[in-house]
Image (cartoon, rainbow, N blue to C red):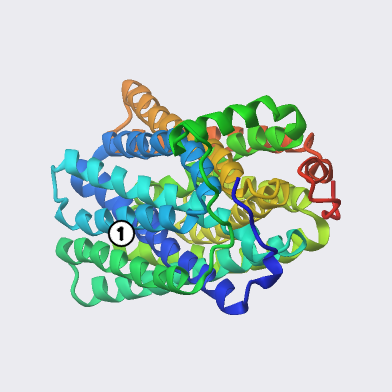
Amino acid sequence: MATTTLPSKSTNREKWAWYFYDFGDSAYAAVVLLAVYSAYFKNAVVGGAEGSRLWGIAVGIAMLVVAVISPVLGTIADFSGSKKRFLFSFTSLAVIFTGMLFFVQQGMVFIGVLFFVLAEIGYRSAQVFYNALLPEIAHPHEMGRVSGNGWAFGSFGGIVCLLIVLAAIQLIGGALIVRLSLVFTAVFFAASALPLFLLLKERAKEQPLPPGENYISLAFKRLAETFREVRNYREFVKFLIAFLIFNDGILMTLDFAAILGAVLFGMGQQELIIFMILVQITSVVGAYIFGLVADDWGGKLSLLIALVLMMVPVGWLYFTTSKLAFYFIGGLAGFALTGVQSVSRSVVGQMAPAGKSAEFYGFFSVAGRTSSFIGPTVFGLVVVWATRYYEGLGQAALLAEQNGHRLALFSIIAFLAAGTILLLFVNVKKAQEQAGNGDLSPAR
């Protein structure tokens, strides 16, 4: 396998290069997934409850592809010392097809789905290799802080990008500006990612292939070996199962936030962007605070707190009809959900054995992408089923669609609650010991 030098040799400049990548890919998430393209696709490209269903399916397709390829590519990256090369390839895919979304107009459902799916595959796959660089630049005892800093600075990138997009939409307006905002986001992402490729040194070194092997065959053999050794990493597997379930709830919230604002409260494009800026602001605070809490109190306790906090705004959303309350709900959700995401990333870094970080983050990606496939698809299907049910009861189309989205909120709560319960049975300290990383977590 690839060998890795101690992360103590990393510099502050390298850490900031790593942070800046998050600055750019968070802009993609803020504009494409949260504030602009999701609502544009649902309302302008498709329309009605069918837009929510197709959006959920599109997200699911992309995540399923990533779930299949991530473990194999992660294993290859570990052995060949090529995390940065894979990261560059998938980042390029995301940037190119984010820009291509400019060409999606009303009724162009096929290319609207196709270009988005390709951009999502690039965006999500790149995260596997980006996350796998974390153990190379941070010691286990500081991973919570470094991961939290990256997520906080990344969320700030989303704010900056959204503010620029909002200003353009307010000053000029129209569908053309909405589409141009996607081109701007692609450029923003590419420029922010550049420092990582120029300044961060990958510490894993390429190892010679055994005779008669190639990277693909070796990857499958190493994966088979990891599966055979899974009894040695039982706590990691338990964590992955819990993560798979509670991450469903997180991603369902993210993927449908703009759609919920538009359907339940009639929010237009400008209002949605303002709403997402608020969410990004509280995300900065949440990521930073939970990064500190994770290092002081431990990843497990931090995750439990964040998950409980996450269930509060989702439940509140079911009962409220106030647009003002929706802004408060979004702020609380942003604070909690980045805590869940950043702490989960740092916990995996602590559980991964030396030389297997990309492989373990590949498995982490499988759990995340499987949940990305299941959760949004379930939410979209529940919306369509419930909308038709309420229409059958004689409700007007808009009211039936609103009630369908409200009912689907219970699916989010169900995933969050089930994952939280399973997390209670994970012993993080034991997982670190099983990985040979020592007793580094202050909480079990």
Residue 70 x, y percent position in the rendering: 47, 40
Residue 419 in picture, x, y percent from top left: 66, 35
SS at mark 1 in the image: helix
Question: From this viewpoint, is residue 376 visible?
Answer: no
Q: Tell me if mark 1 has few (under 14), some (14-19) or many (20+) residues whose alpha carbon lies within 10 angstroms of its own.
A: many
| Residue at 37% in and 71% down | 161
Residue at image point 35% right, 72% down: 191
Above or below, comparing residue 405 to residue 180 in the picture: above
**Quarter of the picture holding the N terminus:** top right
Where 342 falls versus 7 (above or below)?
Answer: above
Residue 10 location, x and y as percent?
63, 72
Q: Is residue 316 left or right of residue 231?
A: left
As displayed, is residue 228 above or below residue 110?
above
The total of numbered circles placed on residues is: 1
Horizontal side, residue 277 vs residue 339: left or right: left
Amino acid identity at mark 1: Val
